[in-house]
Amino acid sequence: MPPTVRHNRLVLVNGEEGAGKSTIVRALLPHTPNGARIDAEDLGQTNPCLMDDEFFNLLRRNVAGLVENFWTAGYANVIAGSFLRDYPDYLAFRELLRLPCAVFLVELVVDKDVRDGRRVTRAKLTTQEWRDMVDLIPEDLTIRQAADPDYRYVGLDTTGLDVPETVRRIKDAIPEIYAR
């Protein structure tokens, strides 16, 4: 069942490291009417980067605050990515949003070989040690099953897709925002 159409809409772009979250968040914005984007990787730059529960609590609060600030300023459609690890993270984030909204969770899935290639050629360079650590995080499929009536899951395998085709498929999946 599609989310009920409300004034505030949130597109959450999720996926493993190298899936293309930041790239797609940037590429969607020019197509998003009354839109704003948040890449939590930019918000969450810390030294040291502990990536523990306390860090993710802070990151969720920061993203939620920015989302609501954009909505209050009239940007009805916000795209945010790179801050959810699993379904409990989504639930904790959703509790932080005080304004009613429709949420569209776009999960980018990509074959490991393609993802690994992207990880070593992208602008955000990482070390092999970092990539190995991130690869140990188990995939969480529960985020696909949110029971919230204003939530829609959109899974997209981007293994053989370029950025324009990925954007086109996301737009087709969310006509509430991207109706032609």
Image (cartoon, helix red, strand yellow):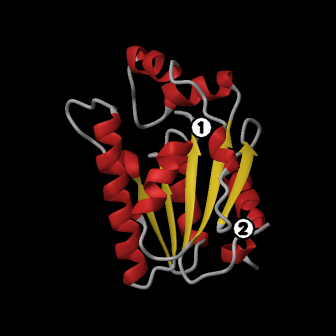
Marking on residue 19: 1
Coordinates of residue 106 in the picture (x, y in percent): 64, 53
Horizontally, residue 28 falls left or right of residue 171, namely: left
Q: Earlier in the sequence, mark 1 or mark 2?
A: 1
Q: Quarter holding the N terminus?
A: bottom right
Q: Position of residue 37 (x, y in %)?
A: 45, 64
- Using the image, tell me which numbered label, if any, was put on residue 174: 2
Question: Is 157 on the left or on the right of 27, as rendered?
Answer: right
Whether 28 is drawn above or below 54: the answer is: below
Residue 39 or residue 146, whichever sits in front: 146
At horizontal 62% and vertical 55% (from top left) the residue drawn is 105
Q: Secondary structure at mark 2?
A: loop
SS class, disc 1: loop
Residue 3 location, quadrant? bottom right
The amino acid type of the residue labelled 1 equals Ala
Query: Which of labels 1 and 2 is toward the front?
Result: 2
The amino acid sitting under disc 2 is Ile
Q: Nearer the viewer, residue 61 or 161?
A: 61
